[in-house]
Image (cartoon, rainbow, N blue to C red):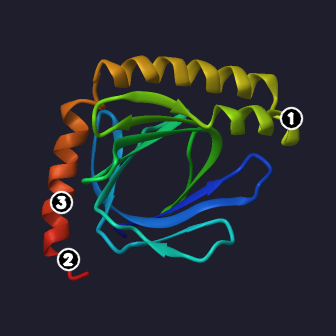
C-alpha cells in the first residue's frame, strides 16, 4: 500500500487551492490520520511552493464537511477547514474549501476565521444555498466541539501528534 496521500484542496469554482502530500499514520473511528515532517513542500494555488516549518497531523473523516490539521509548536494547535466531503481517487483526495475555518490557538482561544471570505465567495462563486446552510451548521457544531475538547479535538489528536513527532525525529529532513 502506498503510504503517500496527495491532498488536493480546490475552491468552489475549481481553481487550485492548497496542494501537498502527507503520509498515512493510521485510522480510527474518527477517520484517516496523515502526517508530514518539517520541510515538507506545500503550494497554494499558483504561488511558489514553500516548506512547512513543523510536523503536521491531518484528519480526514469519511463523508464529513470538515477536515482538521494539528500543528506542532505553532501559534495554533488545531485548524479546521470547512469543506465538501472528501472525494478519493486512489491515493489522491480532493476537497473543496468552503472558506470558513475554526482555529484553536495555542493559548486555548477558539475562533471562527474567514467569515469575510465566505461572504464574498457566496456572491462571486455563486454558492448554492444548501452549501451555505451546511457550511454554517457544520461550523457552529464544530465550534462547540472544539471549545469543549470533544474528541477527536481533545486527547485523540494530541496522541496522533505524539506519534508523528516521534516519526519526524527518525526522518532525515
Q: Is residue 70 left or right of residue 130?
A: left
Q: Earlier in the sequence, mark 2 or mark 3?
A: 3
Total marks in image? 3
- Element type where label 1 sits in the image: helix
Residue 139: x %, y % from top left:
54, 24
Residue 84 appears in view: no
The answer to whether residue 8 shows anywhere in this view is yes
Element at label 2: loop
Q: Residue under circle 1? A: 123
Which quadrant of the structure image shows residue 154?
top left
Rate crowding at label 3 as few (under 14), some (14 to 19) or many (20 or more) other CA atoms within 10 Å: many
Q: Which mark is residue 171?
A: 2
Tell me which residue sits at (37%, 20%) in the image.
Answer: 145
Residue lying farthest bottom? 172
Question: Are discs 2 and 3 less than 8 Å apart at CB?
Answer: no
N-terminal of the pair, mark 2 or mark 1, is 1
Q: From the image, which quarter does the C terminus lie in?
A: bottom left
Q: Residue 43 placed where, x, y %?
A: 56, 69
Label 3 element class: helix
Amino acid at each position: 500500500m502506498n503510504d503517500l496521500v496527495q491532498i488536493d484542496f480546490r475552491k468552489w469554482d475549481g481553481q487550485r487551492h492548497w496542494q501537498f502530500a502527507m503520509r498515512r499514520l493510521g485510522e480510527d473511528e474518527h477517520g484517516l490520520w496523515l502526517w508530514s515532517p518539517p520541510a515538507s513542500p506545500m503550494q497554494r494555488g499558483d504561488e511558489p511552493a514553500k516548506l512547512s516549518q513543523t510536523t503536521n497531523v491531518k484528519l480526514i473523516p469519511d463523508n464529513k464537511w470538515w477536515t482538521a490539521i494539528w500543528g506542532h509548536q505553532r501559534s495554533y494547535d488545531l485548524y479546521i477547514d470547512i469543506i465538501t466531503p472528501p472525494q478519493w481517487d486512489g491515493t489522491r483526495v480532493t476537497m473543496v474549501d468552503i472558506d470558513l475555518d475554526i482555529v484553536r490557538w495555542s493559548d486555548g482561544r477558539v475562533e471562527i476565521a474567514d467569515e469575510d471570505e465566505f461572504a464574498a465567495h457566496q456572491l462571486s462563486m455563486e454558492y448554492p444555498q444548501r452549501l451555505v446552510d451546511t457550511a454554517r451548521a457544520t461550523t457552529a457544531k464544530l465550534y462547540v466541539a472544539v471549545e469543549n475538547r470533544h474528541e477527536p479535538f481533545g486527547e485523540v489528536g494530541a496522541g496522533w501528534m505524539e506519534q508523528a513527532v516521534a516519526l519526524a525525529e527518525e526522518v532525515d529532513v
